[in-house]
Amino acid sequence: MREPRTVAVLLAVSLLGMACAGTRGAPPAAPSPLVYKSEAVGAPKPEALLVALHFSGSSPAFWDEPIQSLGIPVRTLLPQGPRPRRDGFTWFQADHEEKTWEGKTEDVERMAERLAALIREVRAAHPELRRVVVTGFSYGGDLSWMLAIRHPELVDAAVPMGTRLPGDPARGLPASRRVWVLQGEQDAIIPVEHTRERVAELKGRGIPIDVRTYKDLGHDVSPALLEDWRALLRQSLQGQTD
């Protein structure tokens, strides 16, 4: 298993890739492997894997305290966005927000494929894992949603927060899969009306999805949201059904 790389190593790999890409006649360089941290929490060999995806400008460390507060055994998979942004990292190119809905969706699909490869890698290294739950906020929420709908063979449940819900399921999700969307009603980036309409549309097509909203919350998390987040994750990671 790979250990987390340092920012210096990341920068060196990035510069090397740029140099190779600039060579006349050279094919485009393949994306560098994503940096991630994976560890067992609460037991030597937990049977559940929690994949948590940070928001733009943040880092995997954002999840340390929330995961500890779950109070249950779990193996974590905490990937890091490949591009530096502010004091942290982000998942997409700088022009992501300037793209059409279709362009944004393609970006999310491509990154979700890279994350799916990480999930397979960790599951292969830890055959005791029986369940996989994904979560994330903002761009991380977009990605956790995309993983749930594109890779139901890998993901048992998803709790995306502050997500646009891009893309559509390529096939029907098994009835055993669950998606819970958490969002603030004062979100200035993603209108709550859009989320409610999108969830209603998806439910009408048989997708096992529900939404919970928070009255005075913007594009952020709150104690009430995190309380629900913990309850939903505990339920999903322990294989309980509602």
Image (cartoon, helix red, strand yellow):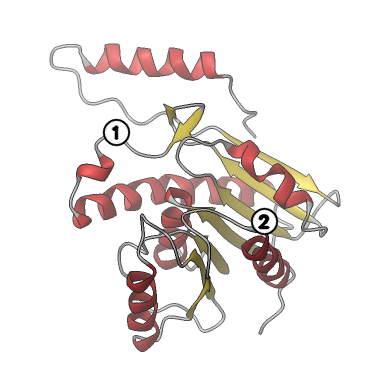
Whole-angstrom CA distance, mark 2 to mark 1, is 31 Å
State the residue at coordinates (39%, 79%): 172
Taking 87 as reference, is 103 left or right? left
List the single residue furthest toward the front: 216
Q: In the rendered view, tell whether residue 86 sits above or below residue 214.
A: above
Question: Which residue is found at the position 45% from the left and 16% from the top?
Answer: 11
Can residue 191 be seen by looking at this rendering?
yes
Q: Of 158 and 101, which appears nearest the observer?
A: 101
Determine if residue 155 is in view.
no
State which quarter of the image contains the N terminus: top right
* Rendering quarter of residue 194: bottom left
Count neighbours of disc 1 (C-alpha within 10 A) and say few if under 14, some if 14 to 19, many if 20 or more: few
Q: Nearer the viewer, residue 32 or 201?
A: 201
Tell me: residue 213, above or below residue 200.
above
State whether residue 118 is above or below residue 12.
below
- Which residue sits furthest right? 43
Residue 49 is labelled as 2
Instruction: Please report the residue visible at 73 percent of the width from the left and 67 percent of the height from the top.
Output: 234
Looking at marks 2 and 1 on the same chain, the residue that comes earlier in the sequence is marked by 2
Q: Position of residue 16 (x, y in %)?
A: 36, 13
